[in-house]
Amino acid sequence: MWAYTDLLSFRAQGIAPGAHDTAFPLSGLVRSDHLAYLQQPDFYRTLAAKVAVHAGPRDPAAPPLESGA
């Protein structure tokens, strides 16, 4: 995911194999848009959907993932 107004973001599609870009709409404030992703629930929903689609199903025989807690 990337944003037109985030000067530090960039498109990866066509550069990194398997990358699928989505332009993410932000406020348009160049100074704050780089971290604005982290404050928007839609960012996390979009990211989770992309991971689910592109990571494929998890092996049911694999051990449970650690929660990190």
Image: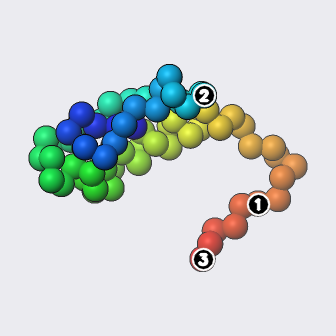
> Which dot marks residue 15?
none
Q: Is residue 2 left or right of residue 51?
A: left
State the quadrant of the N terminus: top left
Q: Rounded to the nearest whole Å, what is the CA distance between mark 3 and mark 2? A: 33 Å
Q: Nearer the viewer, mark 3 or mark 2?
A: 2
* x and y, in percent, of residue 18 in the image: 60, 28
Residue on which disc 1 sits: 64
* x and y, in percent, of residue 50 in the image: 51, 35
Q: Mark 1 vs mark 3: which is more N-terminal?
A: 1
Q: Secondary structure at mark 2?
A: loop
Q: Residue at x 62, y 72 (%)?
A: 68
Which residue sits furthest bottom? 69
Q: Residue at x 41, y 48 (%)?
A: 44
In the figure, residue 42 lies in which quadrant? Answer: top left
Residue on which disc 3 sits: 69
Residue on which disc 2 sits: 17
Q: Residue at x 13, y 41 (%)?
A: 28
> Mark 3 belongs to which amino acid?
Ala
Above or below: residue 14 compared with residue 26: above
> Mark 1 belongs to which amino acid?
Pro
> Mark 2 belongs to which amino acid?
Pro
